[in-house]
Image: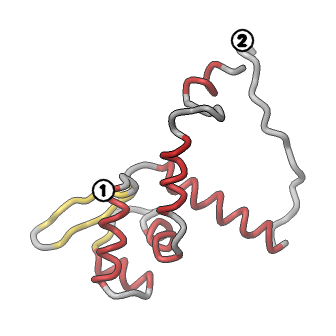
């Protein structure tokens, strides 16, 4: 088994499985996915995010607060404005992969075949 795979906990018995499920549950909301997409290019204030998401600032603030507790986003305050940004690139990659999967599910993405993702042997 690949040492890197084991080090990152990519095994069925990993201690991170339940936490990964919590991340997926946090992203199982269209507004939150839209917020992640909106934050891809950098931080934004709540009002701008509310406009992009098509929701009230109060509703977006509630979503962002949950996402912050889940460590998906972080904040910076400037005066009375709070700016949100992605905590890291991992959450963006999860959303991007889900969007690509959606394209494939609808048949709108080009078929690039299925390349098996097998772990490399250590030392390769």
Is residue 69 shown left or right of residue 77?
A: right
Check disc 2: other Cα within 10 Å, few if <14, some if 14-19, many if 20+.
few
Q: Image quadrant of residue 46?
A: bottom left
* Residue labelled with disc 2: 123
**Could you say whether the residue bearing mark 1 is in a helix, strand or loop?**
strand
Task: Give the numbered dot on residue 34.
Answer: none
Q: Residues within 10 Å of mark 1 (few under 14, many from 20)?
A: some
Of residues 66 and 89, which is closer to you in this image? 66
**Residue 108, image x, y percentages:** 81, 73
* Label 2 to label 1: alpha-carbon separation: 38 Å
Position of 35 compared to 65: left or right? right
Q: Is residue 99 above or below residue 112?
A: below
Q: Residue furthest top?
A: 123
Taking the spot 63% from the left edge, 27% from the top edge, the residue there is 5
What coloring was used for the rendering? secondary structure
Which residue carries the number 1 mark? 74
User: Where residue 34 sits in the image (x, y, percent)?
Assistant: 49, 74
Mark 2 touches mark 1? (CB < 8 Å): no
Image quarter (top left, top right, bottom left or bottom right) of the N terminus = top right
**Residue 63 point in image, percent of width and height:** 36, 72
Where is residue 32 drawn, in percent x and y? 46, 70
- Which residue appears at 38% of the width and 86% of the height? 51
How many numbered marks have been drawn onto this rendered protein structure? 2
Query: Which residue is pictured at 65% across the width and 66% down the height?
Result: 99
Rendered view: 114 above or below 47: above
- Residue at disc 2, secondary structure: loop
Q: Is residue 35 left or right of residue 110?
A: left
Vertical placement of residue 56 versus 66, above or below: below
Tell me where residue 124 sits by quadrant: top right
Decide which of tag 2 and tag 1 comes sooner along the chain: 1
Looking at the picture, tell me which residue is in the foreground, 62 or 34.
62
């Amino acid at each position: 088994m690949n040492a890197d795979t084991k080090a990152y906990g990519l095994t069925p018995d990993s201690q991170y499985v339940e936490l990964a499920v919590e991340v997926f549950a946090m992203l199982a909301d269209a507004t939150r996915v839209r917020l992640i997409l909106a934050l891809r290019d950098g931080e934004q204030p709540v009002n701008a995010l509310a406009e992009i998401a098509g929701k009230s600032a109060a509703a977006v603030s509630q979503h962002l607060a949950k996402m912050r507790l889940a460590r998906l986003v972080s904040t910076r305050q400037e005066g009375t404005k709070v700016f949100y940004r992605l905590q890291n690139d991992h959450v963006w990659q999860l959303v991007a992969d889900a969007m690509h999967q959606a394209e494939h599910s609808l048949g709108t993405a080009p078929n690039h075949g299925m390349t098996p993702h097998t772990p490399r042997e250590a030392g390769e």
